Image (spheres, grey):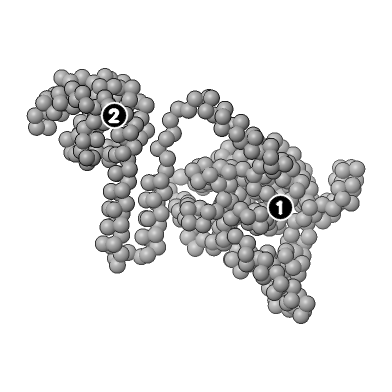
Amino acid sequence: MKDDVEKILLSKLMNKQKDYYDNHEALQPSLFNNIVYKDIFNWLDAEYQQGNKFDMIKASNDLSHIKDVSYVLAQLYSDNATWTYHTKSCVEHLKDVSKRDAIKNLCHDVLSSLDDKDVSEHITALENSLVNMNRSDNGGIIELKTHMKQAVALIEKNSLSQGLSGIPSGFPSIDKFTGGWQPQDLIIVGGASSMGKTSFALALAYNAALSGCKSAVFSYEMSSNQLVSRIISNETGIDNRYLIKGTLTDDEWSSIHSSMGRIENVPMFIDECSNTSLRYLMNKVRQYVITKGVKLVMVDYLQLVSNLVKGRSREQEVSIIARSLKNLAKELDITVVALSQLSRGVERNEGSRPMLSNLRESGEIEQAADAVLFVYRPEYYGIFADHNGNNIKGMAEIIFAKGRNIGIGSKWLRWINYLTKFEELSNKDKDMIFC
């Protein structure tokens, strides 16, 4: 049956060049098992790629290594039975058969070498193969009217969400500004050392999970115990230093035990990233998305991911990492929040207030990001009042330096130092700052 479909498809492509261009993204040599048909397709593919039309004489000369090639080509070209079939149906059928064969071969390869390789290598290979197999081949031209229908449907959906169309951050003022984190977006969170950028990004991942949106944290700097300790501190109000030392009162122990039930049920995953390679990160993200249904990923932080390629500068490496994360967000339809260090040049800014140019190895980071946020705490630099003389001690400014779809601006949060925690401003705080 498959041989017949291969023959029908070739015949249609030879007779109707338009069918080739309408389906070119899905047309691959791997669709053909018959060696003769595969050779003919490869020749036809090369000719159409050069803008040529099918020429029987040229085909016979170029494919002279095929036995009775003129007869084979003539049969294919004049097969009247092909007109009752649609080219797209033939392609879909052959793709389905090809995928089934690929899965069978994949299973066979794994079984035959199961004892020779490390189990993790098998898992990585399987994940890569399945993701590649599952990628959509339909990236063709879509008419504006189709895009319009999709856009209007999305607007209608968003109109029912009371302004929050994406993943909530857990901070109402930020959600009001952003509308929530959107799928396929790369969000960069930058900040100088000790600004609390890890605490802020961890809060974004944790709050997303609290809302029912599964999240995954990839931590290259802090252990899972340290991150969980911060979450417990935030939930209980117990100074994180006491948690580390274990010097707790009976009431504090009671508070921890009562919070455990809430925390344990939060759908968030933490990966300590024993391997720093970009390949490991990409495969792990795919694994969490495919097997766990994760919708938001946090990476702490960009400059600790490695993508060593001979002859490339560190800036080029980080650029590739940033672009890869953006492409991964689009591929998997997820939100990626990635932390980034700042260069020491930030200290030369007025009040050490960060700007886009302060992103370390910033070239592609700024370009790839849909939004760039900076965490800035003026009091760290001895600044306790804003330009209007308002008291900003214990406050943090979340600066939206870039927002592809949301614009730029800033929002203030309360910073609780002993908990390394951000909170929404009280009405009193707002009156003080925005009076």
CA neighbours of label 1 inside 10 A, class few (<14), some (14 to 19), many (20+): many
* Residue 306 on image: x %, y %: 49, 53
Compared with 117, 70 (above or below) is above
SS for dot 2 = loop
Kind of residue at disc 1 = Gly
* Res. 113 image quadrant: bottom left
Q: What amino acid type is highlighted by mark number 2?
A: Tyr
Q: Is residue 168 visible?
A: yes
Mark 2 lies on residue? 85
For residue 366, say whether it is visible.
no
**Circle on res. 188:** none
Counting from the top left corner in percent of width and height, residue 52 is at 27, 20
Q: Are marks 1 and 2 in contact (CB under 8 Å)?
A: no
Nearer the observer, 247 or 22: 22
Identify the residue position indicated by label 1 in the image. Answer: 170
Residue drawn at (56%, 29%) of the image: 149
**Around disc 2, counting alpha carbons within 10 Å, would you say few (fewer than 14), some (14 to 19), or many (20 or more)?**
few
Of circles 1 and 2, the one toward us is 2
Give the structural element (helix, strand or loop) at label 1. loop
